[in-house]
């Protein structure tokens, strides 16, 4: 009997036994190192996805391995009924390097946003009463796929099919301060937004926009929540994206790169809002386990001490300069935007064929919206690796233009 290739076997079994909620690429990845991954047929790929902005220190990071192995030999999980050193150490590091006074640990970006929604509403109820409960978020935003974060997400394609959604959410266009002002009624308790919209197409704030949002929230006594799940932890060339704009939120959410691959999320807030969460008001079994927080502590210390945040800025500038050169050669490129190593390239054609062509050439990239290519590589990416992708994109765009005539 002919032996079935392992790739085919894995894909067939996955398709047979798992929910089909993902549009997966037909490859089975088995190993990674730095910015490279390999499939089970031995083919190598340069990874400009990084688990969707997760593996900032790269795949199989020695630092992450050491932290994981050391803590796994000590203590993995004991519940939040008890204090643990790694959790406390990570909380202290986050507070000392941010605007915040308190940290709540959970398991994902969606959970951190759930916590932010609950905190904002509970604080507002205690201070102003139950009528003031509406949260304003942005059209084309993405905050997660639980019922609350789905209700807060401003993309109809993601919300469709789950009615009735949670009440108390209102949507306005990103970069439209007048629309936000018009929506800021007496029933509003918070504004929830990504400083840079990732899933929405790598959309950056216009000059003065975030400053205007902060001023409006302060004037109205409304909490400002920044969802930094995708753009935080050094990706933009600063530890947190909002630092580029000289504004601070009242609540911030983190996940993804916080654990470099281990599931962990965090919700940070000022002391004033944090007081609304007393014992029993919110909890999660696996939030901030010794294992996850030990790894996250090592990751954060590396970001702070080893120069990776500045490296992200420098590599992002280099990458964008290379893309700008490509835009001068290829009319298919309409716009290039982003900060540090979250970069979006808007095309005048659908992006999916470009994503597939890159995969065929040994490069993993992803899209955002129909016509935007999104690049979120590990922060440890090198110029030579960026050059290889730029060369591949150049050839792909040439091929596209030849076919278009």
Image (cartoon, rainbow, N blue to C red):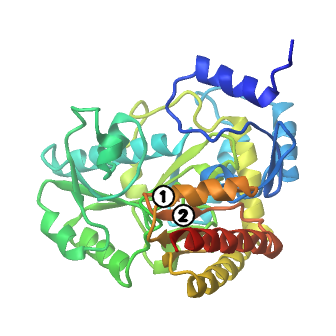
Residue 157 in percent (x, y) is at 33, 45
Q: Is residue 162 above or below residue 252?
A: above
> Is 243 displayed left or right of 399 in the figure?
left
Instruction: Give the farthest residue toward the front.
Output: 405
The alpha-carbon separation of the residues under discs 2 and 1 comes to: 6 Å
User: Is residue 238 shown to the viewer in this render?
Assistant: no
SS type, badge 2: strand
The image quadrant that residue 86 belongs to is top right
Q: Nearer the viewer, residue 30 or 239?
A: 30
The answer to which image quadrant residue 310 occupies is bottom right
At x 84% / y 46%, what residue is drawn? 43
Query: Residue at image x 65%, y 76%?
Result: 316
If the image is split into quadrants, where does the N terminus sit? top right
Q: Is residue 359 visible?
A: yes
Residue bearing mark 2: 373
Q: Residue, x 77% and y 31% (percent of image)?
A: 7
Query: What percent of the width, then of the height, locates residue 381?
Result: 77, 67
């Amino acid at each position: 009997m002919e032996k079935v290739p392992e790739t085919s076997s894995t894909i067939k079994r996955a398709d047979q036994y798992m929910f089909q909620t993902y549009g997966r690429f037909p490859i089975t990845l088995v190993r990674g190192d730095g910015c490279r991954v390999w499939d089970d047929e031995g083919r190598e790929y340069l990874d400009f996805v990084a688990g969707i902005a997760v593996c900032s220190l790269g795949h199989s990071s020695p630092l992450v391995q050491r932290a994981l192995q050391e803590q796994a030999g000590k203590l993995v999980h004991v519940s939040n009924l008890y204090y643990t050193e790694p959790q406390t150490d990570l909380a202290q590091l986050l507070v000392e390097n941010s605007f915040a006074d308190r940290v709540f640990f959970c398991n994902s970006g969606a959970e951190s946003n759930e916590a932010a929604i609950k905190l904002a509403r509970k604080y507002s109820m205690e201070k102003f009463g139950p009528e003031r409960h509406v949260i304003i978020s942005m059209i084309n935003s993405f905050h997660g796929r639980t019922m609350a974060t789905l209700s807060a997400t401003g993309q109809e394609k993601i919300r469709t099919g789950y009615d009735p959604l949670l009440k108390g959410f209102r949507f306005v266009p990103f970069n439209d301060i007048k629309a936000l002002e018009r929506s800021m009624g007496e029933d509003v308790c918070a504004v929830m937004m990504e400083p840079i919209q990732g899933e929405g197409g790598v959309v950056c704030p216009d000059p003065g926009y975030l400053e205007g949002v902060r001023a409006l929230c302060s004037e109205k006594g409304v909490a400002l929540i920044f969802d930094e799940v995708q753009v935080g932890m050094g990706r933009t060339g600063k530890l947190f994206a909002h630092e580029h704009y000289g504004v601070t939120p009242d609540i911030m959410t983190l996940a993804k790169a916080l654990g470099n691959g281990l599931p962990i999320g965090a919700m940070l807030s000022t002391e004033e809002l944090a007081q609304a969460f007393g014992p029993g008001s919110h909890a999660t079994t696996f939030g901030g386990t010794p294992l996850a927080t030990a790894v996250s502590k090592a990751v954060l210390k590396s970001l702070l001490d080893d120069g990776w945040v500045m490296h992200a800025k420098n590599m992002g500038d280099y990458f964008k300069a290379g893309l700008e050169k490509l835009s001068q050669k290829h009319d298919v490129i309409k716009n290039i935007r982003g900060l540090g190593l979250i970069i979006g390239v808007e095309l005048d054609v659908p992006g999916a064929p470009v994503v597939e062509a890159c995969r065929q050439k040994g490069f993993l990239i992803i899209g955002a919206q129909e016509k935007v290519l999104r690049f979120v590589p590990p922060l440890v990416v090198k110029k030579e690796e960026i050059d290889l992708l730029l060369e591949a994109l150049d050839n792909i765009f040439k091929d596209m233009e030849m076919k278009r005539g």
